[in-house]
Image (tube, rainbow, N blue to C red):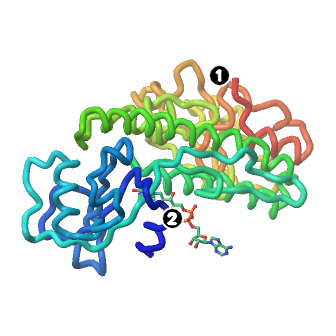
């Protein structure tokens, strides 16, 4: 495999990844193997081929343990050398792609791209698989909605591409700027993590505020229905007023539902809802509706497909 990769990227290695086995717990990521041995995994990244050491750009010696360690330690700016217990396991070239497909869905026959087939990111930050899993979560409930007859395929797929493209773009913007920062500082410290990292992964809702189109922040008393829709209401009085129409609509559609009331005196609830008191979440916890007191139009008096679209498809302000 390594020989194949080296041929593919011959002369233009923008980066190389090494896999290590090492005792102890620092530094780098840990991958468990058989519950016993630990695999360590590291990247060495160069701005251009001329910045890479000659033995690497020549395509020779990338798997040499001593050279691999030397390069990784230099790139990690390690305060502590990795020492003799480290053993190089594997190495391969990769390209820090920043690509997104022009079109992700076909309506007839219904088909959708997800994961690396739809988008590619540089490994910096470890977003690639996460964004793919997010695609799968967003696609999963849409496919269930089609199979269960809640939504027509056109409606079920609407919004998928725009929503997931936006998620990829958030991560890509972070990766591009973080990679530039790492390149210019020459270090792999964790300075770019924290708020910006989490915001790239999850969107602005990491500040604790509920937003249409993003996951509902975790709230005390809010238990979401993963197979259907959830009504979250601040205060028992409003819950009593809107819950019957919500449940009746879900019965008409045939979709599992849950209603829960949360306490507005809780700080997390107050921060999440602000002036709003009512939220509806689809099966993957994304908020589709936020309001001061009312259900979306079409829920109380619409037919089942109108009500399903009103509950499951988000309409951003
Ligand atoms: C060096 C490196 C480090 C990374 N580190 C991280 C990380 O730390 N965190 C993170 O979240 N992501 C990371 N990623 C990204 C992550 O690996 C990918 O985003 C993820 O594996 C994509 O999953 P996928 O299922 O969409 O595609 P793939 O993993 O590419 O799976 C597609 C599968 O389809 C198979 N296939 C292709 N064509 C056919 C066919 N015609 N018929 C049948 N099967 C076929 C392929 O063999 C493959 O098994 C990293 C990527 C790289 C390169």
Residue at horizontal 24%, vertical 39%?
186
* Residue 60 location (% of width, % of height): 31, 67
> Tag count in the figure?
2
Quarter of the image containing the C terminus?
A: top right
Q: CA distance from mark 1 to mark 2?
A: 57 Å
Residue at horizontal 20%, vertical 69%?
65
Q: Describe residue 43's horizontal placement relative to residue 272 as left or right.
A: left
Label 1 near ligand 1 (CB < 8 Å): no
> To which residue does mark 2 refer?
8
* Residue 170 location (% of width, % of height): 53, 36
Question: Does dot 1 land on a helix, a strand or a loop?
Answer: loop
Determine if residue 136 is in view: no
> To which residue does mark 1 refer?
292
Q: Describe residue 185's horizontal placement relative to residue 155 as left or right.
A: left
Q: Image height check: is 277 above or below 146?
A: above
Q: Nearer the viewer, residue 64 or 175?
A: 64
Quarter of the image containing the N terminus?
A: bottom left
Q: Image height check: is 315 above or below 124?
A: above
Residue at horizontal 47%, vertical 37%?
200
Q: Describe residue 132's horizontal placement relative to residue 200 as left or right.
A: right
**Which is in the foreground here, disc 1 or disc 2?**
2
Residue at horizontal 38%, vertical 43%?
48
* Residue 125 location (% of width, % of height): 39, 46
Q: Nearer the viewer, residue 29 or 268?
A: 29
Q: Nearer the viewer, residue 125 or 255?
A: 125
Q: In the rendered structure, are the residues bearing label 1 and label 2 in contact, judged by CB atoms less than 8 Å apart?
A: no
Characterize the local packing of mark 2: few (<14), some (14-19) or many (20 or more) Cα atoms within 10 angstroms.
few
Q: Image height check: is 102 above or below 37?
A: above
As drawn, the label of residue 88 is: none
């Amino acid at each position: 495999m390594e020989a194949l990769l080296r041929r593919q990227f011959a002369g233009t290695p923008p980066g190389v990844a090494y896999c290590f086995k090492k005792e102890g717990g620092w530094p780098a990521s840990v991958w468990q193997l058989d519950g016993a041995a630990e695999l360590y995994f590291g990247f060495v990244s160069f701005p251009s081929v001329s910045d890479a050491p000659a033995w690497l750009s020549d395509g020779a010696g990338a798997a040499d343990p001593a050279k691999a360690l030397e390069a990784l330690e230099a790139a990690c700016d390690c305060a502590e050398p990795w020492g003799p217990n480290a053993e190089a396991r594997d190495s391969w070239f990769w390209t820090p792609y920043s690509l997104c497909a022009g079109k992700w869905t076909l309506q007839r026959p219904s088909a959708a791209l997800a994961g690396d087939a739809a988008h590619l990111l540089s490994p910096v930050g470890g977003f690639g698989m996460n964004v793919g899993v997010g695609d799968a979560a967003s696609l999963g409930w849409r496919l269930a909605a089609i199979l269960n007859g809640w939504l027509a395929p056109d409606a079920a797929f609407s919004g998928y591409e725009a929503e997931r493209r936006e998620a990829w773009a958030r991560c890509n913007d972070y990766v591009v700027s973080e990679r530039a920062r790492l390149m210019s500082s020459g270090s792999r410290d964790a300075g770019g993590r924290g708020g910006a990292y989490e915001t790239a992964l999850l969107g602005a809702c990491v500040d604790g505020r509920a937003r249409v189109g993003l996951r509902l922040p975790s709230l005390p008393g809010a238990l979401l229905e993963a197979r259907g829709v959830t009504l979250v209401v601040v205060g028992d009085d409003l819950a009593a007023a809107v819950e019957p129409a919500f449940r009746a609509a879900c019965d008409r559609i045939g979709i599992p539902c849950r209603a829960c009331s949360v306490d507005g005196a809780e700080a997390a609830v107050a921060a999440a809802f602000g002036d709003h008191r009512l939220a509806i979440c689809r099966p993957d916890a994304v908020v589709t509706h936020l309001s001061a007191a009312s259900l979306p139009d079409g829920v109380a008096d619409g037919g089942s497909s109108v009500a399903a679209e009103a509950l499951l498809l988000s309409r951003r302000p």
